[in-house]
Image (cartoon, rainbow, N blue to C red):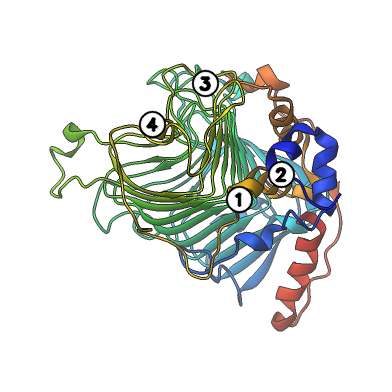
Amino acid sequence: MKCFGALTFALLGLGAVAAAAEDSAVPGGAAMHFTGFGADTPGGRGGRVIKVTNLGANGEGSLRAALEAAGPRIVVFEVGGLIDWRKETVKITHGRLTLAGETAPSPGVTIIRGSLLVEAPDLILRHVRVRLGDGGDLKTPDWEADSISTNGARVKNVLFDHVSTSWSIDENLSVSGPREKDGTSSFVTIRHCIIAEGLDKSTHPKGPHSKGTLIHDFVHDVAIVGNFYAHDFNRNPLLKPNSTAFQANNLVYDPGSAAMHFAYVPNEYTVIPHPMLPPRLTSIGNVVRLGRSSEPRLRSAFSGVGKLYQRDNRFYDRAGTLVWSGTDGDRLRLADEKVQMVGQPMDAPRDFTPLPSSLTEAYVLKNAGARPKDRDSVDQRIVQDYLNRAGKVIDSQDEVGGYPKVAPTQRKLEVPKDPAELDAWLAGYLKTVEY
């Protein structure tokens, strides 16, 4: 196999995923590397190495203890399996952290029934899974956690890379904080993530609430690249007023009421001492494909009051018909009449050339999510559902097999004592889980 279009790839079945992994026509993850927007954060480089040696919810040797530790640190794993946080939110309040999930033995590390809240700068989180769910036997009314979110002005230079999130009660993976100018998160990259199956009719106090990603008011310089959004009813992503984002080569499948959209609610700004300015989105090379959960009112790939620069985006209807090709088709199937189109990119990373949208589907299915060479059964199913044009927005993780059941694994790590050798040592582990 030398080359193929994205649609051909998608129709070939799961075997095509393995074929794509060997095909140089579909690049590996390096294609999404760039500088700026937090992607070049140092994380914990130069700090001490902390080993996670058990799967306990807390205590010495646990992931929670490593996340809550102070000072520059690189977290590596001598264990693989499930970590059950039993409906707790774990906060990262100390910056200069690299969470290197690639070092865990197969099948890697999955956090269940827990939420991760980032409130610190200079972080790299990669190759972990957060599968929140409704709590199962701990299910209670009005629980409304995200799987992963950021909060506050201290959040700068943060990279989420090759992370899998699913079954959230609120958003799966969001960049957020107070509605304050210069008081919220900024310079954040979400790259190569699977952001899927936000729970709809679950425990959220507002009622149905299946959501992908929220970019909150005043959040700026967010890059969303190479991700797979699947079966999130909306917010794939949603941009609030005064926010700015760059979006490239994402695959959005089976949105319900909206795909990529803007929020503009004047009464939310009655007590905010700043003008409500339309959000700005620069969007290149993305693919939206409607599915079983997509409602008839979802007529456009982009919707709401906001400014949009777009190039080479594709939109397929429920029948699989390409209704916007990147340049041709029904203009309102690209963006509704509320969207203000602009002629030049407004915000974009440095040193980055997006892939053509003809490669987006194949690229994302190959590279997205935690440990794409070693995906867990949940991510495998989500990819297979896309290939089969199956799946839907769900109300509970129990509809798709429930929380994963994984036997714990363990191996000793020989960490280099010379800090100068540590980057190369980590790179060796990355090669075992990434293309």
Q: Position of residue 191 (x, y in %)?
A: 58, 53
Nearer-N-terminus badge (3/2): 2
Q: Residues within 10 Å of mark 3 (few under 14, many from 20)?
A: many
Tag shown at residue 5: 2
Tag shown at residue 294: 3
Label 4: which secondary element = helix
Instruction: Find disc 4 in the rendering and name its residue.
Output: 332
Nearer-N-terminus badge (1/2): 2
Left or right: 141 in relation to 413: left
Distance of label 4 from label 3 (alpha carbons)? 17 Å
Q: Position of residue 388 (x, y in %)?
A: 74, 25
Left or right: 226 in relation to 378: left
- Residue 83, quarter of picture: top right
Specify the amino acid type for callout 2. Gly
- Callout in the foreground (1, 2): 2
Residue at image point 45% right, 34% down: 301
Residue at image point 54% right, 65% down: 352
Distance of label 1 from label 3 (alpha carbons)? 38 Å
Specify the amino acid type for callout 3. Ser
Nearer-N-terminus badge (4/3): 3
Label 2: which secondary element = loop
Front residue of 308/162: it is 308
Q: Is residue 75 visible?
A: yes
Which quarter of the rendered picture does the C terminus lie within? bottom right
